[in-house]
Amino acid sequence: MFRQLRLRQKPLFTLSSLGAEKILVMAYLAFIFSPMVFALTPPEAALQYLSLSETAERLLKEAQYASVELKFGDTSKTEFVATRSQGDLLPSHWRTVLTLSDQQEPIDQAIDLVHELTHVLGPRVNPYDPSLSLTRYVRIGIEGEGGEGRAIETECKVARELLSQVSAQDVIRLRSRCAPVWGEQTRGPFWYRVLYFVGADIETLGPLLRSLPLRDRAAPLISAAARKPYPLALAEEYLEFTSGLCERLKARQYSGLSQVDQEILRNRCSTSTLSMSLVPSKMPANAITRSVDKRSSGDGTPKAGRVLASRY
Ligand SMILES: [Zn+2]
């Protein structure tokens, strides 16, 4: 089953065709540093853990039909690269690369894989959608089917299924990873709203994301690598790839742009939004940093989009 997942080992972000435009839509990283690619070896130990969980088995089964490249590296993350022909609304090609950290215990590697597969199998956000606003992007990143809330929920569901079947040491690891989440879940189905806690960053984000349930309470769960609450990290990600896209569009003759690109320019490229400076405050001292996340990348072409992503 897993062999289906470890498909190819290729450099990221190669240019596939002239006139193509690429955007790295999201990346989800497990630790701080950029990944190093190693020779692939099946994470048998991790898979053995997952074979004990009904939920994980279901995910792995579904993933057999997904086109995913699997790599090992310092960090766990999922990257989506959307390629479109210039001016089109929809990407003509999506590339998904899942990097799994080989720097941790098999039990954590197993749970990381569950988390990343939730991102992989969830719906994707089209970065070329003229109506993709900053607010919508942040909301989808937290509440969407493939967003952080769902990925964390799924990994901790699997963790719960494993509790009675693994060693005492593994139980400690699972509990330390998921106890904060389980604690929040007892508050109800909208537990993921804690991901909207941004502490002092509400001063920066509040005016930008008015319709989201941001709270000035200290974030109990934040991005380890970005060292900042998720809404801020997501907002930065959006502003970064949108700025790149807008710059490329502005460099061309408006009349020569497709209708889609003209709409993107009108709806998403206003200077007032893109010039927002998001200065993060310091990480709350009591925040629990979990796996993941931050990196930037592009495909090295003149039309390349770049995105910073911050997720679990
Ligand atoms: Zn994630």
Image (cartoon, rainbow, N blue to C red):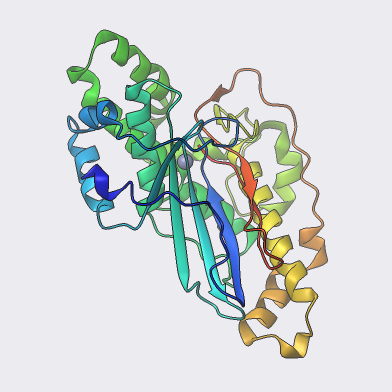
The answer to which quarter of the image holds residue 112 is top left
| Residue 135: x %, y % from top left | 61, 57
Question: What is the tally of numbered marks visible in this picture?
Answer: 0
Left or right placement of residue 49 versus residue 109 in this view: left
Q: Is residue 200 left or right of residue 47?
A: right
At x 30% / y 15%, what residue is drawn? Answer: 170
Residue at 75%, 90% (x, y): give it.
255
Give percent across and percent down for residue 304: 66, 63
Answer whether residue 188 is visible to the viewer in this image.
Answer: no
| Closer-to-camera residue (286/103) | 103
Q: Quadrant of the N terminus?
A: top left
| Residue 127: quadrant of the picture | bottom right
Q: Position of residue 49 (x, y in %)?
A: 23, 27
Work out whether 13 lies above or below 233.
below
226 or 100, which lies in front?
100
Which quadrant of the figure has residue 131?
Answer: bottom right
Q: Is residue 94 left or right of residue 40?
A: right
Q: Which of these two is toward me, 6 or 276?
A: 6
Residue extending farthest to the top is: 168
Place of residue 84 in the rendered image (x, y in percent of width and height, measured from the top left) = 54, 73
Residue at 45% of width from left, 48% of height from top? Answer: 147
* Res. 24 in view: yes
Q: Between residues 19 and 53, which one lies in front from this camera angle?
A: 19
Name the outermost residue toward the bottom: 255
Which residue is pictured at 27% across the width and 32% down the height?
158
Query: Compared to 206, does 39 lie above or below?
Result: above
Q: Residue lying furthest front in this view?
A: 39
